Amino acid sequence: MRIKSIQTGRIQIPLKTPFKTALRTVEAVEDVIVRVETDTGEEGFGEAPPTAVITGDILESIEGAVRNFIAPSLEGMEIEDLDGIMKRLHGCVKGNTSAKAAVDMAVYDLYAKSLGRPLYRILGGARTELETDLTISVNPIPQMVEDSLRAVEEGFSILKIKVGKEGYQDVERIREIRQAVGPDKVIRVDANQGWTAKESVRMIQKMEDLDLDIDLVEQPVPAQDLEGMKFVTSHVNTRILADESVFSPRQAIRVIQEQAADMINIKLMKTGGIHEALKIVNIAEIYGIECMIGCMLESKIAVSAAAHLAAAKSVITAVDLDGPSLCREDPYEGGPLYAGAKIIMPKEAGIGISKVPVSFR
């Protein structure tokens, strides 16, 4: 089974409500879809969102990297030569992690299909079902409370609350949400780099003093401020999750060795796909550090690839794969079943996506 061609297309899916963080506001998923075709007629699919404020990637740069660098480097290679493909993929162009992730997951899709097994089984097969949190976007407090209650009504017991735009008002919004949803729901806080180190400590300690029972705080300080994040981690009891600070295995090792965070958030768009994400998983297992699996504003293809990784590895203990739940519609066929907070892994070989309504070129 050889790679015959690698093509790209675009898809646009409206969101149920605008997605708002400390960094951006988005009203629709508009992503690049990658199709890898083989000489035997098999197809593998991948996806990459343009997340310029985090990865630096835009639609045009993703498409350009795939068409002009990645496709010419990989076409003609045997799917069974997975290590060789990944070496070329990550060596043919620097950066461009989102483009690499899309091609990586399409190749893994085909690799699993060649073995006739679901991808998560090949990667380790730790479990067949996951529970994801649901993101509550930054809005006025009454709306965030309403959105949180609606999420609970829809069966979500883990909420990820976006903050980082209004300083101490963020503590008040968490207090109001906790009072509304009750003590038995899990609340995670994501500041998206929106606080300074000292602000983080003061606000997290205030949440602790108020007994708000926060499960974790994600990336409270700017990505490059590792000393600041270490200061926060050492001065609060709440777990600190490194997100934008960790793109690569090397960065993961540094964060762990310097005790700058308690957990690491793995995202395929940061690592450049499953192959490099597995290295971070291995590092976390060595050091005994738990991981979250997360996503950008991705639809079902990319989120499903991440779900297969999460289902495969027990060190991934937190799941933030709510992309399909945020979308107004699901244009694909096949793949994991997204039933509210539950993600049920498929029995089909590969990632499981069987139909993608996109024009490729």
Image (cartoon, grey):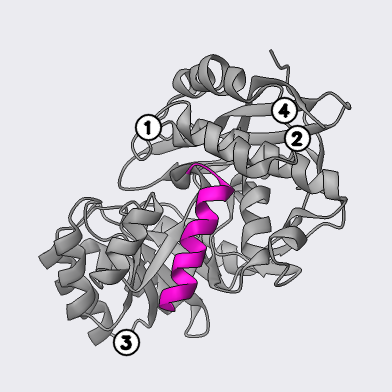
Q: CA distance from mark 1 to mark 4?
A: 25 Å
Q: Are marks 1 and 4 in contact (CB under 8 Å)?
A: no
Rendered location of residue 155, percent (x, y): 66, 69
Q: Nearer the viewer, residue 117 or 26?
A: 117
Q: Which residue is mark 4?
A: 36
165 to the left or right of 294: left
Camera-near label (3 vs 2) is 2
Q: Are marks 3 and 2 in contact (CB under 8 Å)?
A: no
Residue 211 is marked as: 3
Label 4 sits on a secondary structure element that is strand
Please give the range of residues in magenta: 272-289
Q: CA distance from mark 1 to mark 3?
A: 36 Å
Res. 87 in view = yes
Q: Are marks 4 and 2 in contact (CB under 8 Å)?
A: yes
Q: Which residue is mark 2?
A: 44
Question: Total marks drawn?
Answer: 4
Camera-near label (2 vs 1) is 2
138 to the left or right of 88: left
